[in-house]
Amino acid sequence: MPTAVLTDRERTAVQAYLRLLHTVRAAFDGPPGQGRPPVVPPSVLAEAEQALAEAGLTGNEEEFFRLLKDWCPAEP
């Protein structure tokens, strides 16, 4: 299996995406019947969008998800 060596910007984009993913999961995993927070706080979404743009991955989802899979293959 090839090992992906991410640039700093690619790593930042992957980390921002994972924070976004965990934020969404936390919103849906809350106790039933309680009010849910906004699924994606604007600051978390903005961070992910900016990191993707700075890594040159905006509009290149296939490449981004390949990097994500290579860097974090066991994400539950």
Image (cartoon, helix red, strand yellow):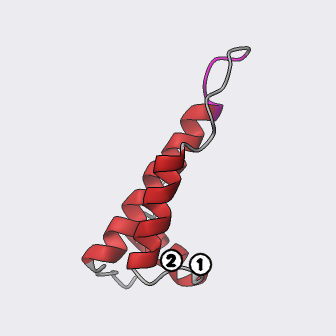
Q: Is residue 11 left or right of residue 66?
A: left
Q: Residues within 10 Å of mark 2 (few under 14, many from 20)?
A: many
Check whether the beta carbons of the residues at disc 1 and disc 2 lie within 8 A of each other: yes
Q: Is residue 30 left or right of residue 71?
A: right
Q: Residue at x 58, y 42 (%)?
A: 24
Q: Which residue is mark 1?
A: 61
Find residue 29 and report its horizontal and vertical position in percent: 61, 29
Find residue 53 and report its horizontal and vertical position in percent: 46, 76
The image quadrant of residue 38 is top right
Secondary structure that dominates the magenta span: loop
Instruction: Provide the residue span drawn in magenta.
Output: 28-32
Q: Residue at x 42, y 74 (%)?
A: 70
How many marks the image carries: the answer is 2
Residue found farthest to the right: 33
Asked whether residue 20 appears in the rendered view, the answer is yes
The secondary element bearing badge 2 is classed as helix
Q: Which mark is residue 38?
A: none
Examine the rendered structure and indicate whether residue 18 appears above or below residue 61: above
Find residue 40 and report its horizontal and vertical position in percent: 58, 44
Q: Residue at x 57, y 84 (%)?
A: 60
Q: Amino acid at mark 1?
A: Glu
Find residue 20 and report its horizontal and vertical position in percent: 50, 51
Q: Which residue is mark 2?
A: 64
